[in-house]
Image: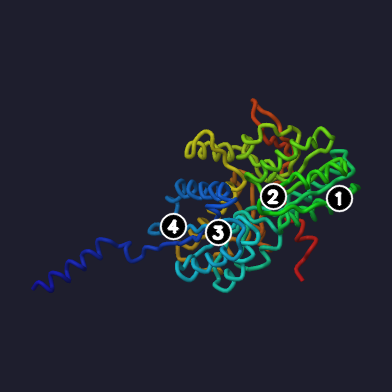
Amino acid sequence: MKYWKSCLAALLLLVATPFAASAQTVKVGLILSYSGQGASIGDLMDKAVKLYIKQHEKDLPAGVKLEIIRRDDTGPNPEVARRLAQELITREKVDFLAGLIYTPNAMAVASLATEAKVPTIVMNAGTSVIVRRSPYIARVSFTMWQSAYPLGKWAAQQSGVKRAYTAVTDYGPGHDSEAAFTKAFTESGGQMVGSVRMPLQNPDFIPFLQRVKDEKPDVLFVFVPAGKVATALMKAYNDLGLAQAGIKLIGQGDIVPDEELPNMGDAPTGIVTVHHYSASADRPQNKAFVAAWKKEYGADSTPSFYSVASWDGMAAIFHTIKAQNGKLDADKTMALLKGWQNPDSPRGPITIDKDTRDIIQNEYIRRLERVNGKLTNVEFETIPQVKDPWVQFNPPQ
């Protein structure tokens, strides 16, 4: 009798919990820098992931749970990133890889994504060729060519400068930025008078910028990774008196990241950059995003382009989960990512190119100004829906 009572109790328990057997956990392996020189970047990206989940977890299909498994790559360390990705794939059985601040790390992970058929959402790394390294990579961030090429055209055609010098960090994104700006600037009638590449790890900018000052170009185009490195660059630019020497500074948004502007108190106004996001933009979606961010993380905290890409990356992941009702198939996921659109991104409308799996987005020409006493990137011109120019110049073989 006791046996049958036990069986009945077990049966009733199963009937009373109908979702127990159908519950589905979707695992996302998030590879970011939580220590080292990129720790502040990793923090901004992770905060965006947390905020998106907090606001949208209720939108997941019934019975579907999202699990974020975080791993620290400690900075631009491709060997570490590859090992972490391998562990996430084989031990944790993740459904997605995501994050990837640095190009070398993203490149190191690409072959693993292909072998294991794990959809990988690049939330930052901006070297153009990354998406060609694996059919299971989609990028929601940017490419260096998207901003550097339009800036090269603008500098030669609109700003009146004729002689330019480039100074970039010596790795993939820097090389892309240098090539893109140089091509556009010279095609538009400008003259390149010099170039220099600076180390990625612990750079001392003074000797490199001294070379620029000695050459006396009209304009200096710079790329360095955003964050504390950008602040160090700006300090060196000021200390050497390049602005007083008549050398204008221009670059991509990395050199004046929104979250670092409070630390650049002595930065000269008038610096022109091209970028896909400004925290100060008047777009309603951006105002709502910034308000939610400050409510969650404090009035003195500011989201950056890192944050927006991570926010949009989670939106893309949620889209594929909802479309498949939580039962994921890697190839279906990639098909859903191709052509995915988000008209309500804080940065403006975005699309994942159905052919390249890369981002299509607005680029904004901005000027660094003081607004109510604070340094602010003020957008004054929009270049709509820019595809990566590198793809057009370098079609697949």
Task: Mark 3 vs mark 2: give the one in front.
Answer: 2
Task: Mark 4 vs mark 2: give the one in front.
Answer: 2
> Which amino acid type corresponds to the residue marked 3 in the rendered image?
Asp
Residue that numbered label 1 is attached to: 194
Q: In what quadrant of the picture does the C terminus appear?
A: bottom right
Is residue 106 or residue 238 the one in the foreground? 238
Q: Secondary structure at mark 1?
A: strand
Is residue 254 or residue 235 the one in the foreground? 235
Any part of residue 230 in sight: yes
Do tag 1 and tag 4 residues touch (Cβ < 8 Å)? no
365 relative position to 120: left or right: right
Q: In what quadrant of the picture does the N terminus appear?
A: bottom left
Q: Secondary structure at mark 2?
A: loop
**Residue 299 drawn above or below residue 385:** above
Residue that numbered label 2 is attached to: 203
Task: Mark 4 vs mark 3: give the one in front.
Answer: 3
How many numbered circles does the render carry? 4
Any part of residue 387 in sight: no
Do tag 4 and tag 3 residues touch (Cβ < 8 Å)? no
**Residue 13 drawn above or below residue 240:** below
Residue that numbered label 4 is attached to: 66
Using the rendered view, name the quadrant where residue 9 is placed.
bottom left
For the point 45% across and 69% down, the residue is 91
For the point 78% across and 60% down, the residue is 392
Do tag 4 and tag 2 residues touch (Cβ < 8 Å)? no
* Extreme residue toward the top, this view: 372
Is residue 277 or residue 91 the one in the foreground? 91
